[in-house]
Amino acid sequence: WQPAQGIPTGAAVRSDRSDANTFYGFAGGRFYRSTDGGRTFAATTATGLPAEAQFKAVPGRKGDVWLAGKTGGLFHSTDSGTTFAKVASISAADTIGFGKAAPGQSYPALYTSGRVGSVPGIYRSDDTGATWVRINDDRTQYGTTNATITGDPRVYGRVYVSTNGRGVVYGDKPGGG
């Protein structure tokens, strides 16, 4: 084992889901990238990111990364984290996950636990984050859903959410896909 160079201790690290040599890191509002299998990292030029966030790379899409910041919102990069665009409609995002694309779409469905405007909830987007549909309601709330969220890669509309104290719950889109 050798320590990776160029990235702070304690940084979150994830792999690019389509390039085995590319890894990403995040710590203290800075995004890092490695193109040598995680041996060395360098900070990207991305600015305006929240101090704390979770991030994930989209499976099968080289350089496609989403970053969820509880106090900063949701950000998307298609250039391996060199730059990020803020998703205007999301004011806070605890997590981000991906699932099977909606019928007729080629991009994975996105799932987040966060706020669209001022309304907290669990949301799905079928159009790369342009619009969001709340998939829970006021009666279906959980103490905390900030650990992880993911869609089913085989079943459109199925989402899995980790909760604080209630384990992992899942839900299906009414009427199926």
Image (cartoon, rainbow, N blue to C red):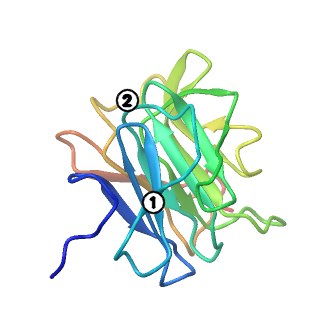
Circle 2 sits on which residue?
141
Cα–Cα span, label 1 and label 2: 40 Å
Residue 62, image x, y percentages: 64, 73
Residue type of the residue flagged with mark 1: Ala
**Circle 1 residues within 10 Å: few <14, some 14–19, many ≥20:** some
Residue 107, label in figure:
none
Does dot 2 land on a helix, a strand or a loop?
loop
Instruction: Point out the image quarter for the N terminus.
Output: bottom left
137 over 32 or under it: above or below: above
Corner quadrant of residue 108: bottom right
Corner quadrant of residue 70: top left
* Pick the front one: 36 or 155: 36
Q: Residue at x 62, y 19 (%)?
A: 117
Specify the farthest residue to the right: 104
Looking at the image, can residue 159 be seen? no
* Pick the front one: 31 or 150: 31
Circle 1 sits on which residue?
42
173 over 60 or under it: above or below: above
Looking at the image, can residue 53 be seen? yes
Residue type of the residue flagged with mark 2: Gln
Q: Residue at x 62, y 77 (%)?
A: 60
Does dot 1 land on a helix, a strand or a loop?
strand
Residue 11, image x, y percentages: 29, 52
Q: Is residue 32 left or right of residue 8?
A: right
Residue 127, image x, y percentages: 77, 50
